Image: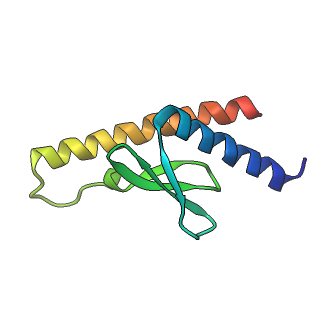
Amino acid sequence: MTKTELQKQRVKAVLEFLTDQFDAQIDDNGDGGRLDITIGEFNGQMHRRDLQVDFYDSIPLGGHGFTPAEIIHHQTAVEFEKQINDEINKVLATLE
């Protein structure tokens, strides 16, 4: 199996996992390296190269003036992103 075929297989397995386990909505945005992803209330992207999910709401908050609700939402996004990426790593480990 070529590297390209292996990577396609890995991407397919991760997309199926995200769709089945997290009811992820995944859209190809035309950028070959990333896919748009929505899971629940969180939007972000999944990178095809390293197969990791990044949520926009997990970007570090800078400065002051954030409400407690915004801070909690950010912390939830960070934790959920970590959980999803840990699960993706487990899926990828089963393919190797």
Which quadrant of the view contains residue 47? Answer: bottom right
Which quarter of the image is occupied by the C terminus?
Answer: top right
- Residue under the image location 12 percent in, 58 percent down: 64
Task: Please state if 84 lies on the left or on the right of 56 as rendered.
Answer: right
Q: Is residue 10 above or below residue 87?
A: below
Which quadrant of the view contains residue 18? Answer: top right
Q: Nearer the viewer, residue 41 or 70?
A: 41
> Which residue extends farthest bottom?
30
Whole-percent x and y of residue 7? 75, 50
- Residue under the image location 51 percent in, 32 percent down: 21
Task: Please state if 61 lies on the left or on the right of 26 as rendered.
Answer: left
Task: Please state if 28 lies on the left or on the right of 7 as rendered.
Answer: left
Task: Please state if 73 lies on the left or on the right of 67 as rendered.
Answer: right
Whole-percent x and y of residue 60? 30, 54
Whole-percent x and y of residue 67? 10, 50
> Which residue extends farthest right?
1
Q: Is residue 72 above or below residue 50?
A: above
- Residue under the image location 47 percent in, 36 percent down: 22
The figure's colour scheme reads: rainbow
